[in-house]
Amino acid sequence: AQKVTQAQTEISVVEKEDVTLDCVYETRDTTYYLFWYKQPPSGELVFLIRRNSFDEQNEISGRYSWNFQKSTSSFNFTITASQVVDSAVYFCALSEEGGTYKYIFGTGTRLKVLA
Amino acid sequence: EAGVTQFPSHSVIEKGQTVTLRCDPISGHDNLYWYRRVMGKEIKFLLHFVKESKQDESGMPNNRFLAERTGGTYSTLKVQPAELEDSGVYFCASSQEQGRDTEAFFGQGTRLTVV
């Protein structure tokens, strides 16, 4: 069965520290997509990144970077030099095989960046 | 371009009452999804519309939940009669293309509290 695990319920860091949010997934599919979303205090889910299962290259976007490793079924997210504005709940998601391509989400990790 | 909007942002109702949630997707998006997050747990898929047709409603909890999308534009999700376990945040999302490599855009959610 498809499943996404975010074992870190809550993380607190001091501003300017680096922080890594873990995501481990399970799927029987050979082709699948992984996503990260950010939920700021305003409530909406903001899309951060999409990665397909055939592309294991790491990606960097400003202070954000993602490490996709199929061998360990992980898709971890690192924020470098964290800022208070990074405080949010972060969700990892897997898109499921089938006609609807619905998302399977993890339980989310609440990140608190302290000034 | 307006994002996905949901109404109301909060709703507190008594057990046994009826509540209707509304979602306005991004204009031109044929795909509309409903998800729900019960406190502290993962965000779970409820159903998927393609235009006005239900593509997948496998996540609907029971027959107290009724979703509609008349005319393929906005969607409503009615809970009748509401139970305590229906409390949670209901998210709506829309996407233009149906595919695993397309991200969905989410609204800010409706927080439903059944007392």
Image: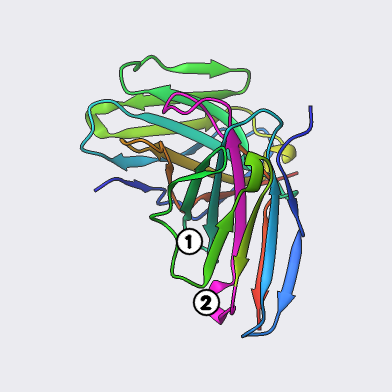
Residue A84 in the image: above or below residue B39: above
Which residue shows up at 56% across the image and 57% down it? B67
The chain that hosts pointer 2 is B
Image quadrant in which you'd find residue A28: top left
Q: Residues within 10 Å of mark 1 (few under 14, many from 20)?
A: few
Which residue shows up at 25% across the image and 33% down it? A72
The chain that hosts pointer 1 is B
Q: Which residues are magenta?
A: B80-104
Asked if the magenta segment contains residue A82, the reply would be no
Image quadrant in which you'd find residue B104: top right
Tell me whether marks 2 and 1 sit on the same chain: yes
Asked if the magenta segment contains residue B94, the reply would be yes
Q: Position of residue A49 (x, y in %)?
A: 53, 26
Image quadrant in which you'd find residue A95: top left
Kind of residue sitting beneath label 2 = Glu
The quadrant of the rendering that contains the N terminus of chain B is top right
Instruction: Look at the numbered disc 2 and give the secondary structure of its residue.
Output: helix
Instruction: Look at the numbered disc 1 and give the secondary structure of its residue.
Output: loop
Is residue B112 shown left or right of residue A3? Answer: right
Q: CA distance from mark 2 to mark 1?
A: 13 Å
If you read the primary sequence from the N terminus, does the residue marked by circle 2 or circle 1 appear first? Answer: 1
Closest to the observer, B33 or B84: B33
Disc 1 designates what residue?
Answer: B41
The colouring scheme, among rainbow, by chain, secondary structure or one colour, is rainbow
Mark linked to residue B85: 2
Closest to the observer, A30 or B19: B19
Residue A55 in the image: above or below residue A78: above
